[in-house]
Amino acid sequence: MKVLAFNSSPHKDKGNTALILNPFLKGMSSAGAEVELFYTCDLDINPCRGELNCMLKTPGKCLQNDDIQMLTPKLGADVLVLASPLYIWTMNGQMKNLLDRMIPLLPANKGRIILVSSCGFWGLENFDPLISYMETVCSKVDRVFAEALLRPHAVYLKMMLEAGAPVQDIPAAVEEAGRQLVVDHIINPKTLGIISRELVSLQVWNERVKQRFGTGVDS
Ligand SMILES: Cc1cc2nc3c(=O)[nH]c(=O)nc-3n(C[C@H](O)[C@H](O)[C@H](O)COP(=O)(O)O)c2cc1C
C-alpha cells in the first residue's frame, strides 16, 4: 500500500498537527505501508493561474513548472493523507493551494483520502465545516473520504505530553489507527474517539483562553 501524506502546518514536525499525523504514519509504516511525507512549506507550489490547461489543453497535466510536476506521479497512491491545522474553520491556505493545483488529478486517481487536523478551540464541532467540505470534494471527484483524525484543544496535548501527563493513550491510539487502516482498511470508531478525547473541561479551557487572550473568544 502506497501512502502519500502532506502536512501544511508552518510548524512542520514541531506542530500540533504533527502530533497526530506522525504516529499515524508510523502505524501505517509498521504495518507494511510505503509512506512518503511532504511539508507544503518546503514545496514550491505556485497558486493556480486558472488557465484550465489541465482540463482543456493537456488533460490531467498542469503546465506550471514547479513541484506539482514532481508530485504528479505520486498522486496515484492508495491513500492520500491531508494534514492541516484548522484556520478560520477550514484547512489552511497552504493546503487549499495544493488542492487547487491537484484538481486535474483528484478525479483520475482513486486512492482513499484521509483528513488529519488539529485545532485550538475546545469542541470537536469546530471541525464540522472542514469535514463537510472534504465530504463534498470527495463525492464530487468520486474519491472515498475514508476517515478523519481530529484533535481539538490540541495545544493541551502538546503541553501534557511535554509535562509527562497521562495522555500517552492518544499517540498510541493514533499509531493503532494507522495500523488498522492498513490491515483492516477501516479505523475503529473507539480508536478515533480516544484520539479526539477531552483533555480539559470546557470551563478550564475558557479560563485559560481568558487569561491569555482576554474575553470575547467562544469555544
Ligand atoms: C491563522 C489561524 C487561524 C486559526 N483558526 C482557528 C479556528 O478557526 N478554529 C480553531 O479552533 N483554531 C484555529 N487556529 C488554531 C490552530 O488550528 C491550532 O493552534 C492548531 O493546532 C495549529 O496546528 P500546528 O501547530 O500544526 O500548526 C488558528 C490558528 C491560526 C494561526
Image (cartoon, rainbow, N blue to C red):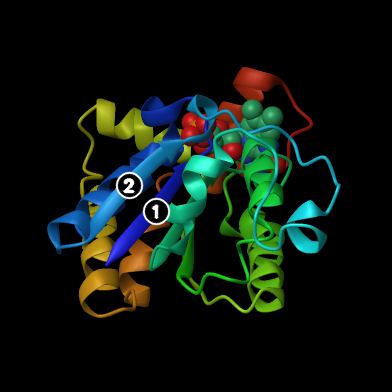
Q: State the image coordinates of residue 22 (x, y, percent, origin top left).
A: 30, 43
**Mark 1 residue type:** Leu
Name which residue lies at 46% across and 71% down: 112
Where on the picture, by quarter, is residue 93? Answer: top right
Q: State the image coordinates of residue 23 (x, y, percent, origin top left).
A: 26, 48
Left or right of residue 140: residue 118 = left
Residue 36 is marked as 2
Residue under label 1, please give it.
4
Q: In which quadrant of the rendered image does the N terminus lie?
A: bottom left
Is residue 170 visible in this depiction of the protein? no
The span from disc 2 to disc 1 (Cα, nearest Å) is: 5 Å
Using a 10 Å C-alpha cutoff, classify the residue at mark 2 as few (fewer than 14 neighbours), some (14 to 19) or many (20 or more). some
Q: Dot 2: what SS?
A: strand
Dot 2 and dot 1 residues touching (CB under 8 Å): yes
Name which residue lies at 65% across and 71% down: 135
Where on the picture, by quarter, is residue 45? Answer: top right
Q: Relative to 45, does residue 139 appear above or below in the rendering?
A: below
- Quick one: which residue is furthest to the right in this view? 51
**Mark 2 residue type:** Glu
Q: In which quadrant of the rendered image does the C terminus lie?
A: top right
Is residue 114 visible in this depiction of the protein? yes
23 or 164: nearer the eye? 23
Q: Dot 1: what SS?
A: strand
